[in-house]
Amino acid sequence: MNKKILILPGDGIGPEILTQAERVLEVLRASGEKIEWRHGLLGGIAVDQEGSPYPEATQKAAREADAILMGAVGGPKYDELPRELRPERGILGIRKDLQLFANLRPALAYEELAAASSLKPEVIAGLDILILRELTGDIYFGEPRGRRKTAEGFDEGFDTMKYSTPEVERIARAGFEAARKRSGRLCSVDKENVLETSRFWRETVIRIGAEYPDVELSHMYVDNAAMQLLKNPRQFDVIVTGNIFGDILSDEASMLAGSIGMLPSASLDANNKGLYEPIHGSAPDIAGQDKANPLATILSIAMMFKYSFGQSDVSDRIEAAVKKVLRDGYRTGDIALPGEKVIGTQAMGDAVVAALG
């Protein structure tokens, strides 16, 4: 039986990077992989065409799919829409609908791109971090939220940060399991010194840690973690943290790799069904100009085969093709150093397809 993939190109550069990703899927299918795919609407384009950032047709298709591959959503043209119609509500909606609670973001330093990092090559050499971000709770989803008048008559905005026992337990276990498969070290990041939610988080992680005596557990405040990612990033193996802290730290970690355009991500449910996407945004300023880097999207396919389909051999094949392309000197503008030849989105896709054989 074919594995069913739902492709959600989204907005901005999303459609053009997904076009290159589809070419990779076509190569894999031609070489015998039993996969099929269909397209759907999510984000701004869904608002434009269906009046909702996560339309019913997309909901149905997403629930039926074995995995989802997404481009990017959003753009300035949607900034004035009501909150419930913002493109980003489509992402939050699909995560909540499919219970995609664990976001996996690898931060790898490719040897060929060491000079493109903002840090010294000797600081990032051999860097290999996995950040697990809890994805369906925290202040992004907490209620109540809104605006109100204070007793003094001032306007006030408010949100609610909260986590329940099951939410922390499942992401903690995911973190320990990931660390067990790597170097056996897990760092839990919180703000336990000032936030009650973080105190609860730390207590729960410590309790779950007793089930994993073979994994070394440490704790770090989020502000210190942000500094340590720049000062000594190789001290980390697996980081597990909440939604808002993970959002910030994973974007910071992406720059260690030289460009946000190089890093994929996976958002998984309890059965490893996943939503796969590059961590970068929709970049409307370069949309349609053949400038976008499609490698993070292509590497998202590698993660799809590894985590949702359980085919590490296919994942390794894709990653090897990307490494070959970089080794051969192909660069889009975001990863090019001064004087290096810059190619476009289409040409980078050509190079990866050729490397896949």
Image (cartoon, rainbow, N blue to C red):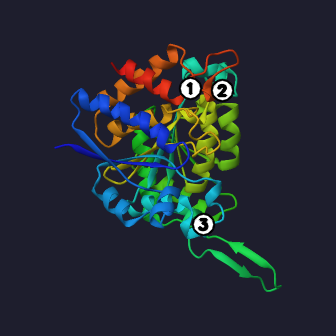
Does the CB distance between marks 3 and 2 fall below 8 Å?
no
Does the CB distance between marks 1 and 2 fall below 8 Å?
yes
| Disc number placed over residue 315 in the picture, else none | none
Percent x, y of residue 184: 45, 35
Q: CA distance from mark 3 to mark 2?
A: 34 Å
Q: Residue at x 64, y 40 (%)?
A: 252
Percent x, y of residue 93: 46, 63
On the question of residue 96 being in view, the answer is yes
In terms of depth relative to the viewer, which is nearer, 148 or 241?
148
Regarding mark 1 in the picture, which secondary structure is present there?
A: loop
Q: Amino acid at mark 3?
A: Met
Q: Residue at x 65, y 36 (%)?
A: 229
Q: Quadrant of residue 290?
A: top right
| Relative to 301, residue 258 above or below | above
Which badge, 1 or 2, is on the more N-terminal residue? Answer: 1
Q: Of circles 3 and 2, which is in front?
A: 2
Which residue does the numbered mark 3 point to in the structure image? 161
Which residue does the numbered mark 1 point to in the structure image? 109
